[in-house]
Image: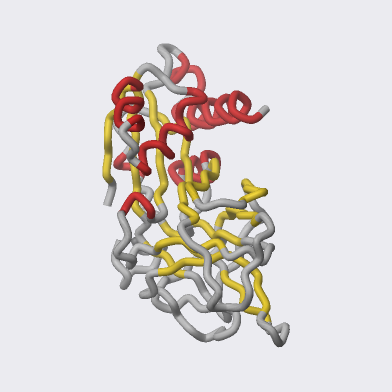
Amino acid sequence: MFHRIRFSLATLASVASRGSHMLVALGAALLASAPAQADIIILPVAEDTAPYSFVPSLPRYNNPTLYAFEGFDEQSTPHDFETYLWFDVDPAEIPAGHVLVEATLLVTYAFGSSDYGVPSLDPGTLACREVLEDWDQTTLTWANRPDIAAPFETLTGIDALGAQLCDATLVVHHWLQGTNPNHGFALTNETERVIGMHSRESSADPSLKPQLILRTELPEPGVATALGTGGLALALARRIRRGRRAGTTEQTHAGA
């Protein structure tokens, strides 16, 4: 379930300097608006799958690979993939008195593939989207995949392996406040560059699998009373955005 870590900035800088892949990516997501002390909650992906257009009825939930791209073989037959991720975001795990100030979706572009046609070397694009309907990794296929929203962030110019970070603060805020149900995320890539990622079933290092990183803080004195907890979380989230860029497989998400 949740893996909660309390970092000071000095601790974060120290472990990042020793080359931890997960914490280097975490540091990149947090340093722009770092507090003196924050709670960091690192959530491993609880359900994931990447349906395949060429075999539209195929469930891939037990496959070690996730993909996002739109490809074609020598006969111009489409070979498209999308990735679906779900994290067990439980409001009860937010530390008492804290509010959410940042949520970062971290996925690692770990490999490409030539199994689905000649891969493109042109830069890729990763669109991070909120899923709008319930789904289950054991039954999701290309044919029955759920509706997804317009991207809340799009990463462009991807031309090398490495960590990809999407700012999911407002999406997760709505989940925690109960204003939107948590149906997870979808990753799409409208280019032919094969973006391959390790799934939760992979034997890869856990730090290379999808993660959702939450940062919470105690509100400033007096501000919480004026705004209320939900309003404060949203206000802090908006302030950060301006500063930076001016489970079990048997359960469905509705019951998890």
Image position of 176 with respect to 33: above or below: below
What's the image's color scheme?
secondary structure
**Residue placed most toward the observer, 220 or 241:** 241
Image position of 107 with respect to 169: above or below: below
Give residue 118's position: percent from left, percent from top.
Answer: 63, 74
Asked if residue 133 lies left or right of residue 221, the reply is right
Residue closest to the far top: 221
Residue closest to the far right: 76
Give residue 235's position: percent from left, percent from top.
Answer: 55, 26
Asked if residue 42 lies left or right of residue 74, the reply is left
Residue under the point 44% across and 12% down: 222
Image position of 227 with respect to 115: above or below: above
Image position of 222 with respect to 194: above or below: above
Residue under the point 30% across and 55% down: 205
Residue under the point 48% across and 34% down: 29
Residue under the point 59% across and 28% down: 244
Q: Quadrant of residue 214?
A: top left
How many marks are shown on the rendered structure? 0
Q: Quadrant of residue 18?
A: top left
Is the C terminus in the top left, top right, bottom left or bottom right quadrant? Answer: bottom left
Asked if residue 28 lies left or right of residue 76, the reply is left
Give residue 26's position: percent from left, percent from top.
Answer: 41, 37
Give residue 3's position: percent from left, percent from top.
Answer: 27, 44
**Residue placed most toward the observer, 56 or 181:** 56
